[in-house]
């Protein structure tokens, strides 16, 4: 397989984060339109995340916030957003970099995004063995896959009951 020198994965991820940034920018300027509301999940300990020690003790790895009726002072910059929310009646200010976000969901229209965070990328890289350590994948017919070949095209007849 050829090296992806263009880095389509990075371009796609950044474009999708741009969608999230634009949606939050619009919400900051105009409020939430109609029934739209957002579930935003982020890594609590990611670089640049600022939450209170109280919230960090409750959500030591990942936290999901909901932007719907009771949030205030939503500020969106190129690399993060800041928002005021109340947790158990206590007002809190959160700062969340976009690259700490792992999931975004707007249930009013069933629209969601899932992002690979920096921690996910490091974990995946550690779990993936070096190319020379892996054997070629076997196809359903147990024929070894030749290096450089793409996915096998399978005819639907193969799965039909006879």
Image (cartoon, rainbow, N blue to C red):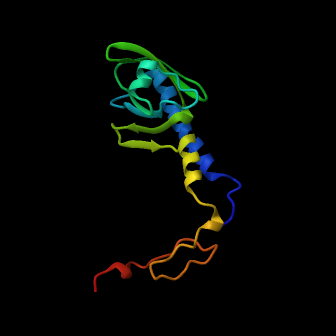
Quadrant where the image shows the N terminus: bottom right
What residue is at 46 percent from the left and 44 percent from the top? 114
Outermost residue, right side: 5
Percent of width and height locating residue 8: 63, 52
What residue is at 32 percent from the left and 17 percent from the top? 88
| Camera-side residue of 140 and 112 | 140
Is residue 105 something that shows in the picture? yes
Q: In the rendered picture of this protein, how many numbered marks are placed on residues?
A: 0
Residue 156, image quadrant:
bottom left
Outermost residue, bottom side: 162
Percent of width and height locating residue 74: 48, 20
| Camera-side residue of 138 and 64 | 138
Quadrant where the image shows the C terminus: bottom left
Percent of width and height locating residue 148: 64, 73
| Camera-side residue of 37 and 148 | 148
What residue is at 46 percent from the left and 82 percent from the top? 141
Q: Is residue 17 left or right of residue 58?
A: right
What residue is at 61 percent from the left and 28 percent from the top? 78
Is residue 84 something that shows in the picture? no
| Camera-side residue of 148 and 25 | 148
Residue 91, image quadrant:
top left
Percent of width and height locating residue 28: 48, 22
Outermost residue, left side: 161
């Amino acid at each position: 397989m050829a090296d992806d020198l263009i880095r389509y994965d990075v371009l796609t991820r950044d474009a999708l984060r741009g969608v999230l940034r634009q949606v939050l920018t619009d919400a900051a300027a105009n409020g939430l339109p109609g029934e739209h509301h957002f579930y935003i999940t982020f890594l609590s300990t990611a670089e640049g995340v600022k939450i209170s020690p109280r919230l960090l003790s409750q959500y030591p790895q990942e936290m999901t916030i909901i932007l719907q009726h009771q949030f205030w002072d939503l500020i969106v910059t190129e690399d993060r957003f800041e928002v005021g929310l109340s947790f158990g009646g206590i007002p809190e200010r959160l700062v969340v970099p976009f690259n700490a976000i792992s999931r975004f969901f707007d249930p009013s229209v069933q629209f969601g995004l899932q992002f690979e965070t920096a921690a996910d990328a490091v974990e995946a890289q550690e779990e993936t063995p070096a190319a020379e350590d892996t054997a070629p994948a076997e196809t359903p017919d147990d024929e070894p896959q030749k290096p450089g070949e793409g996915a096998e095209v399978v005819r639907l007849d193969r799965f039909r009951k006879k």
